[in-house]
Image: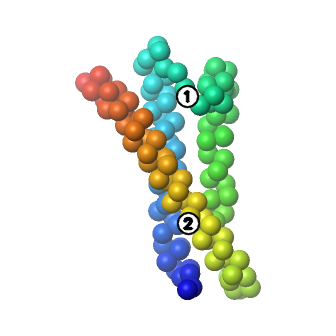
Amino acid sequence: MSLNLDFLEKILLPLFIAFLCLEFMDIYSTLLALRNTLVFHELNPIASALFSMKFSGFLLATLFKYLPGVPLFYAVFVKDPENKHPFGLRMVRFIGLVSLISIDAVLFYIVGWNNIPTLITYLNGSQ
């Protein structure tokens, strides 16, 4: 079985964009929850400690949130124009594919289960 690089190139970019959008929705809904409710409690102990540091902690938490995007960016956009490392390129792209599928699935669950109700409540309350 051979991995088709053209297929991987076509599917990796939409998965990466979905990852970035889901991360943004998670951060945005967390900000809405922090702003609109007095009893909001972040379940992630690291994020909770960072949010207690006010704005600088929020920036640090956002940096940590998007940090996994750096190696994923490499997996999506790595090129080998001279075709010197075809096996290595296939391996990096395959690992990127598996990583993006799994992280998108987890983030879709988190955003769908926790954050969409928060966004709907916010939109209904602002009308």
**Left-right relation of 122 to 106:** left
Q: Is residue 16 visible?
A: no
The residue that appears at 43% across and 17% down in the rendered structure is: 37
The C terminus - image quarter? top left
Mark carried by residue 43: 1
**What's the CA distance linking mark 1 and mark 2?**
29 Å
Q: Is residue 63 visible?
A: yes
Measured from the top left, where is residue 1 in percent x and y? 55, 86
**Left-right relation of 77 to 82:** left
Observer-nearest of 76 and 41: 41
Q: Quadrant of residue 45?
A: top right
Mark carried by residue 97: 2
The residue that appears at 42% across and 19% down in the rendered structure is: 36
Mark carried by residue 13: none
- Disc 2 is placed on an element classified as helix
The residue that appears at 32% across and 27% down in the rendered structure is: 121
Q: Amino acid at mark 1?
A: Leu
